[in-house]
Image: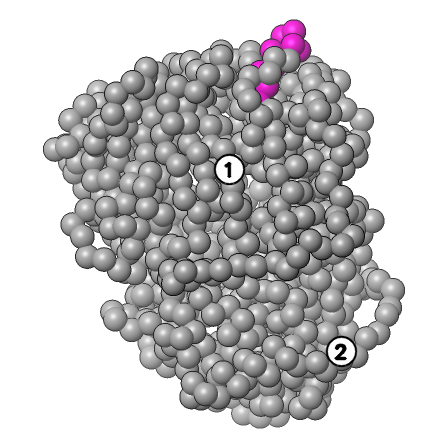
Amino acid sequence: MNYLNCIIAFALCCICNVALAQQNMSYQTPPKAIADLIDAPPTPVVSVSPDKAWMLLLSQPSLPSIEEVSQEELRLAGIRINPKNNGSSRAAYYNGASLKSITNNKELSISGLPQDPQLENVQWSPDGSKVAFTNSLDNGIEIWVLDIPTAMAKRLTRANVNDAIGTPFTWLPDNKTILYKAILANHGEAPKEPTVPKGPITQSNDGEVAPVRTYQDLLKNPYDESLFEYYATTQLTLLDVVTAKNTPYSNSGMISNFDVSPDGNYFLMTTLLKPFSYLVPYSQFPQEVAICDKKGTKVKTIAHVPVGETLPKGFDAVREGPRSFSWRADMPASLYWVEAQDEGDPKKVVAIRDKMFYIEAPFNTEPKESIGFKLRYAGTIWGDGKLAISYERQWQNRQEIISQWSPEKAMDSKATIFDRSYEDSYTAPGSFQTKRNQYGRNVLLTANNNKTLYLIGIGASPEGNRPFIDEFDITTKTAKRLWRSEAPFYEVPFALLDPQKATVLTRRESTNEPPNYFIRNWKTGKLTQLTDFDNPYQELEGIGKELIKYKRTDGVEMTGTMYLPKGYNKEKDGPLPVFMWAYPREFKSADAASQVTSSPYEFTRISWGSPLFWVTQGYAVFDNFSMPIIGEGDKEPNESFVEQLRMNAEAAVNKIVGMGVADRDRIAVGGHSYGAFMTANLLAHTDLFAAGVARSGAYNRTLTPFGFQSEERSFWEAPDVYAKMSPFYYADKIKEPILLIHGEADNNSGTFPIQSERFYTALKGHGATTRLVLLPHESHGYRAKESVMHMLWETTSWLDKYVKNKPKGGREVKP
């Protein structure tokens, strides 16, 4: 398809005015086995104290009602705000908590918790003696503190916490003071929308190149600006958790982030500035970064960061000037940051791409230079002042460099530990483990005078993931394996308790045993069970599960997980209808694309978006089947996107049909987001599937003209690629039934609901069998119980009608 045709199709999409066929209906409920899985109570979330003496077990509620999800919200500057309590309108919360001792295995109930709690922002104090959290009410948000020795919780503030943007509070290192964002005492009422506009809304650009990716929920007019400023403006306040005394700390402002120095004497504050942008979310608004003392007096302005509208193109593009500000964890009050040496442009060839700078208390000198980075800076783990580990990455070739260096001799001490492709899961070294230092900050866990470090990794391998613990010698740069998960269990190290005693807290599960927590001694093999969570998914007990391996025609190795109905017998029952589910991923290496990145021994979990529900309805489910899109060397993966989709799908279908479990004529394909995009393309460009289910997808890439997913090029640089990848352009080729489901309030970048609406009209205009379901008040992920139940009912009805109840196969298996 040439450039002119692409432009014409884009224009037709934008001006299309065909009315959607509307049908109002009540929410429906899927079959009981599926509904019971949705109603199953989630297992608790576990949080371990900094001193590793306690586990906080946080219970989760079932899905909220559509009444709760439908409450008023403001969509401003890339976020969604609940105007009634000045918090997030869509945050997940906990509805209960208990304590479990790691040392003696006793469980304690917590007294004093609020009635009908909605707990968020859970933070341990640095010494692990307390836990602070917010509790959301209809008309405000409070701060509560749990005292661990007494297991008693109490409320410490009025419902005046501002949780609209950023983190609402942080502990100070004294373990008895919290700095939090408070709503202004004289806040007044929110601005009223003008009934008569004062004039047109304008934006302008004076010839500056400013490519911006597609964002949702941006500011649109001066009224939006006034609302955002109203809800973002806050008063930092000091809270004494012993006396519950509140003391205003600083002048009010739109403070997005704040952090206390390790010694507690200084505060780093990031304040949003005007003018606001209508093109980017608030995180890219102009900002002032400054240091204040304990009295709230500004000591040093570190940077004025410009608006992020004019970033160069590319995933490694960054703003010029200082960025990534943070306190050194190993020093009392030393602030560090990095600055691009390539003007933020990843396409420029430079020897040093980023450089670190720092400034120390009392901040009355000029910043000093520290180490440089060949690639884009990606973070630092500090040690004891003599050792640090830094990370740097480059998107273009997926390179990652992990280095050790001495802050005392920064300019000439940097040495590479690992230089690898971060796509290569088999060589992933794991994560360096940390401990709390005298300031309550996480620093490297070391032994043998800084010569020994500890690594925990997921352990991807050809047999599947096998999590591990390694001892790493920093002088020889070699690792010694201390422990590795063994079949038939999948056991993940959760917290390293005492390396000298060889003890670790793990989460252990198997295909038929739900995850629970244990203390493992990796030398003796002794296991002490701490939790006994029940299997919440009784309806899935007895189903078959197998990791399937196969190859596509060019030799790339593939995997997928096959689930079979309980009691299924291939010889007796014959081939089944199949629901296949996937999500495409881009790779720069065929070897990386071929790697196994799951475990055959993981417990079978299910979430609202899973395809596993239909294994209870007599379907075989081929989940997460490989969908790699590979572009090695100078080739871009998307140059052959459709061809590789076809190869992937043909290999998967031929494999499961060849196994004798799949009826070739009764196979459906589905996916969410980029998986929905995949689904529509497969129906447009293959004849492999009886039907498709596409949820919350994007189908016309010209509506995301400055890049999408892993595509860095703009529409104008690669118009043919954008056109060929857009199933909207091939709506006339789709002959199989396709179900489109979309959240009416989708907040994901690029997947506007109009994507499904326009695709539906295009399909309908060409006589396709299709159905569009818009879920009221739902964003990219669906939350309301009624919405999820209805989505499952729609999918079940679609699969039963167009897949299960089709005549059984008869075509021969392709070689």
Q: Tell me, yes or no, whether the highlighted magenta stretch contains residue 239.
A: yes
Per the image, label 1 sits on a secondary structure element best described as strand
Residue 280 visible? The answer is yes
Look at the image and say whether residue 237 sits in the magenta stretch: yes
Under mark 1, the amino acid is Leu
User: Residue beneath label 2, please?
Assistant: 20
Quadrant location, the N terminus: bottom left
Q: Residue sitting at 20 percent across and 40 percent down?
A: 372
Residue span colored magenta? 236-245
Tell me which residue sits at (76%, 43%) in the image.
Answer: 192
Quarter holding the C terminus? Answer: bottom left
Q: Nearer the viewer, mark 2 or mark 1?
A: 1
Residue 299 occupies quadrant: top left
* First-in-chain label (2 vs 1): 2
* Residue closer to the observer: 173 or 239: 239
What residue did someone put label 1 on? Answer: 272
Residue 551 percent location from the top left of the image: 39, 75
> Around disc 2, counting alpha carbons within 10 Å, would you say few (fewer than 14), some (14 to 19), or many (20 or more)?
few
Residue in the picture at 56% in, 30% down: 253
Along the line of sight, the residue nearer the viewer: 234 or 515? 234
The vertical placement of 278 against 125, above or below, is: below
Mark 1 closeness class: few <14, some 14–19, many ≥20 residues within 10 Å: many
Residue 194 rendering spot, x and y as whole percentages: 75, 49
Spatial CA distance of label 2 from label 1 is 41 Å
x%, y% of residue 797? 77, 73
Q: Residue at x 58, y 38 (%)?
A: 165
Image disc number at residue 608: none
Nearer to me, 281 or 534: 281
Toward which corner of the image does residue 475 lie, by quadrant? Answer: top left
